[in-house]
Image: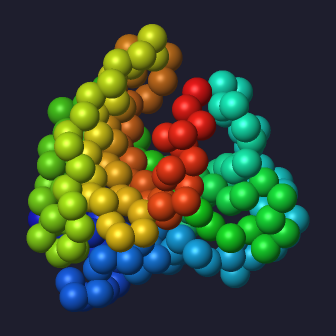
Amino acid sequence: MKKLLAIVVLSLCFITPSQADDVRDFQIEGMSVGDSLLDYYSKDEILLKKLKPVKEQKSFEYISFQFKPPKESEYQFISIQTKKNDNNYIIYGIRGIIPYKNNIEDCYKKQIEISKEITKLFSGKPMKKTEQTTNLGTNKFQGILLKNGQITLNCVDYFKDYTDHFSVSIQDLIYTEWVHKDKY
């Protein structure tokens, strides 16, 4: 289990604690906020992976792309957010998703373990642990606020029809503020 935790933490970033106050220092599958998606995928690949914006949002300033990472990754999906009309596809948010089919307790354990490691390794203000319940399920999240963004750890326990999952999200401050301001 310690080996798995080390892999997850190392996949988040390759930095020293003295550097860890800038959201751009964190990585998921080698990608960081501020990078161009074109550094990792061709324009044709990007356009094939484009998702529709969330219906309930007031504006559609950002769009998401979903990719299947390499087989050696523990993430099932990588979701990336860019500005809608940005031809350079600059990354404002990255989210790695790990499924926990019928095993939400292991998800909570992973969330606690990774949260402890991130808090030790990186400067920033820990976020209050929060729980939200919707008609789909319960989302428990926590994270750390940095000078120009945030890292969030989520466990989603769906009531039915979906696979429970853990996710690690990295977002810059501009995107984070937009999400909270332009709430559903």
In the displayed structure image, the side of residue 130 where residue 58 appears, left or right:
right
Q: Residue at x 15, y 49 (%)?
A: 112
Q: Quadrant of residue 166?
A: top left
Q: Give the percent coordinates (x, y) of residue 100.
A: 34, 37
Q: Give the percent coordinates (x, y) of residue 81.
A: 63, 56
In the displayed structure image, the side of residue 89 where residue 35 appears, left or right:
left
Residue 11 seen anywhere in this rendered image of the structure? no
Q: Residue at x 38, y 38 (%)?
A: 165
Which residue is outermost to the front?
A: 181
Tell which of 62 and 14 is nearer to you.
Answer: 62
Q: Residue at x 42, y 63 (%)?
A: 149
In the displayed structure image, the side of residue 9 where residue 77 appears, left or right:
right
Tell which of 2 and 179 is nearer to you.
Answer: 179
Q: Residue at x 55, y 59 (%)?
A: 174
Q: Quadrant of residue 59?
A: top right
Q: Give the percent coordinates (x, y) of residue 184.
A: 58, 27
Q: Give the percent coordinates (x, y) of residue 31.
A: 54, 74
Which quadrant is the N terminus positioned in? bottom left
Rendered position, 158 above or below 12: above
Residue 144 seen anywhere in this rendered image of the structure? yes
Tell which of 156 and 93 is nearer to you.
Answer: 93
In the displayed structure image, the side of residue 184 where residue 141 appears, left or right:
left
Give the tally of numbered discs. Answer: 0
